[in-house]
């Protein structure tokens, strides 16, 4: 979200992993293999979790410098 870097969704068991949220109160973004159940935390870039986007998702607006700085404070540099 900070620098707009893009990566392909990781492949596991020859399929793209799917996005899920785990937890009750404080949700954690994960990617899960639908075949075997292998889970990984959302990949990080610029020390911030990346945002999962699929073809049905609307683009995220451009963050202001203040919003970027706030994310850096939360996740560290």
Image (spheres, grey):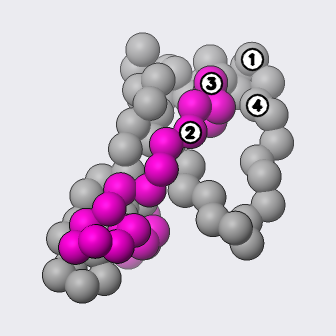
Q: Earlier in the sequence, mark 3 or mark 4?
A: 3
Q: Position of residue 73 (x, y in %)?
A: 50, 21
Residue 22 lies within the magenta run = yes
Which residue corresponds to mark 4? 63
Which residue corresponds to mark 1? 65
Q: Earlier in the sequence, mark 2 or mark 1?
A: 2
SS under mark 3: loop
Q: Earlier in the sequence, mark 4 or mark 2?
A: 2
Residue 6, numbered circle: 2
The answer to whether residue 28 shows anywhere in this view is no
Q: Earlier in the sequence, mark 3 or mark 1?
A: 3
- Spatial separation of the CA atoms under disc 2 and disc 1: 19 Å
- Spatial separation of the CA atoms under disc 3 and disc 4: 9 Å
**Could you tell me what secondary structure mostly forms the magenta stretch?**
loop
Which residue corresponds to mark 3? 3
Q: Nearer the viewer, mark 2 or mark 1?
A: 2
- Spatial separation of the CA atoms under disc 3 and disc 1: 11 Å
Is 74 situated above or below 26?
A: above
């Amino acid at each position: 979200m900070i620098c707009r870097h893009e990566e392909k969704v990781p492949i596991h068991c020859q399929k793209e992993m799917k996005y899920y949220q785990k937890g009750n109160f404080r949700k954690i973004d994960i990617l899960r293999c639908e075949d075997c159940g292998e889970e990984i935390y959302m990949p990080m870039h610029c020390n911030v979790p990346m945002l999962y986007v699929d073809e049905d998702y609307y683009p995220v607006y451009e963050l202001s410098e203040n919003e970027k700085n706030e994310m850096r404070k939360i996740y560290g540099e």
